Image (cartoon, grey):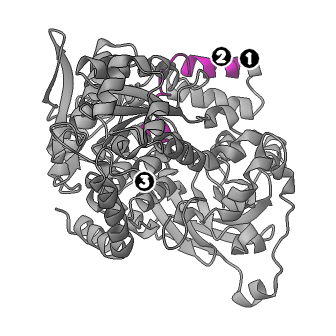
Amino acid sequence: MNPTVIRVTEKIIERSKALRTQYLEDMEKAQQLGPHRGALSCGNLAHGFAACSPTDKQKLTLLTEANIGIISSYNDMLSAHQPYEAYPDKVRKAVHAVGSIAQFAGGVPAMCDGVTQGQDGMELSLFSRDNIAQGAAIALSHNMFDAAVFLGICDKIVPGLLIAALRFGHLPSLFIPSGPMSSGISNAKKAAVRQRFAQGQASRDELLEAESASYHSAGTCTFYGTANSNQLLVELMGLQLPGSSFVSPDSPLREALTEYAAQLSTKITAIGSDFRPLYKIVDEKSIVNAIVGLLATGGSTNHTMHIIAFAKAAGIVVTWDDFSELSKVVPSLTKMYPNGQADINHFHAAGGMGFLVKQLLKGGLVHEDVNTIVGHGLQHYTKEPFLDNGKLVWENGTDESLDLDVVRPINDPFSSEGGLSLLKGNLGRAVIKVSAVKAEHRVIEAPAAVFHDQNALADAISNGSLKRDCVAVVRFQGPKAVGMPELHKLTPYLGNLQDQGYKVALVTDGRMSGASGKVPAAIHLTPEAIEGGLIAKIKEGDMVRVDSSTGELELLVSAAELAARELAVHDVSVSYQGMGRELFAAQRKLVSGAEQGASSLFQDDFL
């Protein structure tokens, strides 16, 4: 094992000792109760299986067969989740075939950042993760289930489902993906049309045609953003079937994987032959494996909050320093958009998860000694699923990359370091994704251009009033201010300014995106402006240094002058009404800072 990986893992274990002990005691206590239906009164149980067939009622009464709870984030609007419409029937049928029962326990909301980008609804996006966790917890609170299967893929949905699953960690849980859509137009062409539109050189019709050719059918969006980062991490943590993340929705292999996963859920219950409760799968080692996977592939910056949040749900305390330390020893092994031009289908075809896991194990960068839903050891995830005369089998994954422009072996990486870095200085602490940033753009020192609204920055670039070297400061975008919306709408505008030869960077207490691109962006800045962060004292023209090489984030103004300055004040109440935002006042008050997971669920001492 790499000594840094060992050291970071040991630090997390020591830091988490008290909370993890509490968590394990809680889960063991819940596990000792056995199948929870046995604790229900006759009236409780009658309500719980009233709509079941007489045969299923008998099985549920006798506690002889497993009852699987299905939690789904299906809706028609998310292309990735649209295939889930048919999954409950598929799961029920597969589970019934082995003599057990499956009940649809509940649905959770699933919003799409791609739809809400730059719109008022985006201010509910991050909060939706905690809402999903609460909804899934309510669905499982009936004490009717011996295991749970979770149907979710995108952005906040998988982290939210995982938080709930971990709070019911005495139950076995597994995730069933639906797979990515087929590849559309090239990412280079899509990005070019977006930038020309931002310059006023492409019509809305042309832009819509390009976007529709990119996002064109059922399945996950194919760029390597938060949705596909979710899938990679959940598989690397052993919570999905090996090699199942990136199989297309309409393939026979996908059908076979779904059936197998549904039936596996019955076998890993306390009633089954191989009890695997979730609390014995997700531990400090599997969390480190998730971070390493994220870094090695240049995954979504959103996971610098999500991993912290779901780790906390398991009593594990992770910090940005852990990400930063690991990033220095984890090489970049993939190039997928926005870090390259390939998409997730190209990655899958070039060797995919089996090859990636082999390389990470070979480099001593991930823990092999972990539990998974299919057995002990991460070696299970070096295998790849196939259909052999209609039967699902797993074979050894490729030992060589089938496309070196997409995924590299451990001894020939794209870069010796991972794709994320920690920035810190007098402005506070922030995250930067550097895997898509060219070397000549990784150190920016320029005058600040200060904005309180992303649209104002976009307008300034579009109308030519901001045509200079600058560090664009977009503040009052943090979780307590306005729910920390993604500012990915700014990517083509800032990219245009950079393409004109200007030195450009972004500093914000908001989020950027799983698709953060070529412009250096210091995001998730904490403390945020509304909490008195120094970002609220930046004035137009102040020199700001963003240095991802040394990890510096500095406002180059004397301490004496800064002490004399007043904090800027901005009325964010306009974001508290409309589009349902008035219903989330409690979350804005309770939400923690970005480095603590930006969660309204967690208190300092635990849940």
* The stretch drawn in magenta includes residue 219: yes
Q: Residue at x 68, y 40 (%)?
A: 489
Q: Which residue is mark 1?
A: 205
Mark on residue 167? 3
Which quarter shows the N terminus? bottom left
Q: Secondary structure at mark 2?
A: helix
Badges 1 and 2: C-beta atoms under 8 Å apart? yes
Q: Which of the 4 image quadrants contains residue 560? A: bottom right
CB atoms at circles 3 and 2 under 8 Å apart?
no
Q: Nearer the viewer, residue 558 or 488?
A: 488
> Hey, what amino acid is under mark 3?
Arg
Q: Tell me which amino acid carries mark 1.
A: Asp
Circle count: 3
Q: Residue at x 32, y 39 (%)?
A: 146
Which label's residue is closer to the chain start, 3 or 2? 3
Q: Position of residue 491 (x, y in %)?
A: 64, 43
Please say if 565 is above or below 508: below
The magenta span reads 205-229
In the picture of the structure, the residue carrying the numbered disc 2 is 209
Residue nearest the viewer, comparing 57 with 164: 57
Which element carries disc 1, helix, strand or loop?
Answer: helix
Q: Residue at horizontal 34%, vertical 56%?
A: 30
Q: Earlier in the sequence, mark 1 or mark 3?
A: 3
Q: Nearer the viewer, mark 3 or mark 2?
A: 3
For the residue carrying disc 1, how many other residues have a C-alpha within 10 Å: few (<14), some (14-19), or many (20+)? few
Left or right placement of residue 329 versus residue 117 in this view: left
Q: Is residue 575 visible?
A: yes
Give yes or no for residue 477 being in the magenta stretch.
no
Q: Nearer the viewer, residue 521 or 53?
A: 53
